[in-house]
Amino acid sequence: MRKNQRNPQKNNSMKEYTEPILVIDETIDLHRTSSWLIENKIEAFLDAAVVKHRKRLLIIHGIGRGVLRQITWDYLSTSPYKSRYYYATRSYGGYGATVVELL
């Protein structure tokens, strides 16, 4: 190789992105659930997760107009269970799902 030629293997500063691996303990899918039933289903889901000592949960609410997500996040913000929650990674549904970590 000449002195002024680049070695593409050494100068490759672009690294391939890999999503963090999440281990989900329990999942609930709220698609096709009436909005007035959402809070009850989430409450029962969280209650069961606590009894089973599950820590990382996935709530699938879909993207749509965001109604189910808003109800889900409103409930989680007032839930008696200490938790943090955020959108799932793409492989778990992205903006159509919420990961809940019970603390």
Image: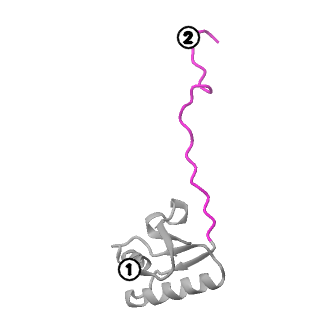
- Residue 32 drawn at (x, y percent): 44, 84
- Residue 100 drawn at (x, y percent): 52, 72
Q: CA distance from mark 2 to mark 1?
A: 60 Å
Residue placed under numbered mark 1 in the picture:
71
- Residue 101 drawn at (x, y percent): 55, 70
Which residue shows up at 38% across the image and 86% down it? Answer: 35
In the picture, the quarter occupied by the C terminus is: bottom right
Residue type indicated by callout 2: Asn
Residue 4, labelled with which disc?
A: 2
What secondary structure is marked by label 2? loop
Q: Which residues are magenta?
A: 1-24
What secondary structure is marked by label 1? helix
Q: Is residue 1 above or below residue 79?
A: above
The local crowd at label 2, few if under 14, some if 14 to 19, many if 20 or more residues have their Cα within 10 Å, is few
Q: Is residue 56 magenta?
A: no
Q: Nearer the viewer, residue 85 or 66?
A: 85
Which residue shows up at 56% across the image and 30% down it? Answer: 12
- The residue lying furthest to the top in this view is 3
Which residue shows up at 46% across the image and 90% down it? Answer: 40
Residue 56, labelled with which disc?
A: none
Residue type indicated by callout 1: Ile
Which residue shows up at 65% across the image and 12% down it? Answer: 1
Q: Is residue 12 magenta?
A: yes
Q: Nearer the viewer, residue 39 or 68?
A: 39
81 sits to left or right of 25: left
- Residue 14 drawn at (x, y percent): 53, 35
Q: Quadrant of residue 16 in the image?
A: top right
The disc, 2 or 1, on the residue closer to the chain's N-terminal end is 2
